[in-house]
Image: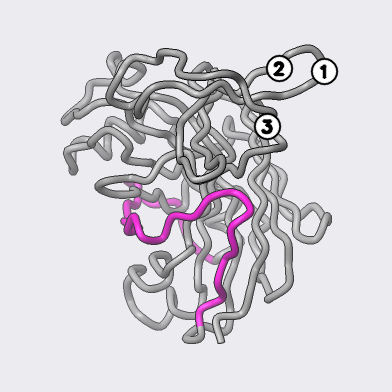
Amino acid sequence: MRIARFSFGDDIKFGVVAAIGDDEVVAPIAGDPLYVPIQPAGDPIPLADVRLLAPVIPRSKIVGIGRNYADHAAEMGNEVPANPLLFLKPNTSVIGPGEPITYPSFSENVHFEAELAVVIGRICKDVPAARVPEVIFGYTCANDVTARDLQQSDGQWARAKGFDSACPLGPWIETELDPADLAVTCTVNGELRQDGRTSQMVRDVVELVTYASSAFTLLPGDVILTGTPAGVGPLEPGDQVAVTVEGIGTLTNRVVSGG
């Protein structure tokens, strides 16, 4: 099931994206599906007539995982860490499909990073591996936008990965997905830049959720970014960057100057 968050007229709603014949529609549902059962709440609307928003706005946090693909660690001149490398992005960094990535005025080297994102569906702590599927609501596409020069100069990653618009998410949440071996790609202006598979991750989704929940209480709507394959590179104002995850869809954003 694909769950979207969208605006239509003056309303912001959640809905189920589905096909009716050759057309895609979004069927509104009542309330936030992270907190209430999914129930129809209106007539289907053509998908082309709505504006898709970030499918989740984390009330708490985005947990990133660094260097979870060996080829990406190598291209950056790093070793694979002995344990998952965790960092946080604030919820103010989240934008949705079609929204602009604002190139920060304090950076000269902003990179794209295509990733599979895990959306947590319930409050949890110290989740054992066998119970990880119970706490996952679904999956979406993410772009872990990174100011590479700040990542190197600051000594920690808060500004580099946490600036406003540094976490595009979308286009919707897919609730029925096996994340074990999915294609993860990124194009910039239509040119393929990243082409990996989740099966190449050093640590899979189960291990990442278990590890993250040992450090943090995870809340409904928290997002875990699972790492990026090799091929990361710079973005410039005017670029259009698209992240595609097999079984989910494509998240597209344009880069604009921050002044």
Name which quarter of the figure residue 162 lies in. Answer: bottom left
Give the structural element (helix, strand or loop) at label 2.
Answer: strand
Residue 22's label in the rendered image is 1
Q: Residues within 10 Å of mark 3 (few under 14, many from 20)?
A: some
Name which quarter of the figure residue 178 lies in. Answer: top right
First in sequence, mark 2 or 3: give its number: 2
* Residue 238 included in the magenta stretch of the image: no
Give the structural element (helix, strand or loop) at label 3.
Answer: helix
**On the rendered structure, is 78 left or right of 50?**
left
Query: Label 1 to label 2, Cα distance in Å?
Result: 7 Å
Name which quarter of the figure residue 257 lies in. Answer: bottom right
The correct choice, above or below, for 189 with respect to 38 in the image is below
Residue 195 image offset from top left, x and y in percent:
72, 44
Q: Kindly identify the amino acid type of the residue bearing the numbered disc 3.
A: Leu
Please report the residue visible at 79 percent of the width from the left and 12 percent of the height from the top.
Answer: 21
First in sequence, mark 3 or 1: give its number: 1
Q: Which residue is label 2 attached to? A: 19
Q: Nearer the viewer, residue 19 or 134?
A: 19
Query: Label 2 to label 3, Cα distance in Å?
Result: 10 Å
Residue 139's label in the rendered image is none
Query: Label 3 to label 1, Cα distance in Å?
Result: 12 Å
Q: Kindly identify the amino acid type of the residue bearing the numbered disc 1.
A: Asp
Please report the residue visible at 50 percent of the width from the left and 66 percent of the height from the top.
Answer: 146
Q: Which residue is label 3 attached to? A: 47
Q: Nearer the viewer, residue 155 or 133?
A: 133
In the rendered view of the protein, which quadrant contains the N terminus? top right
Q: Kindly identify the amino acid type of the residue bearing the numbered disc 2.
A: Ala
Residue 25 image offset from top left, x and y in percent:
67, 24
Assess whether mark 2 and mark 1 are in contact (beta carbons under 8 angstroms): yes
Residue 207 image offset from top left, x and y in percent:
35, 30
Q: Which residues are magenta?
A: 77-104
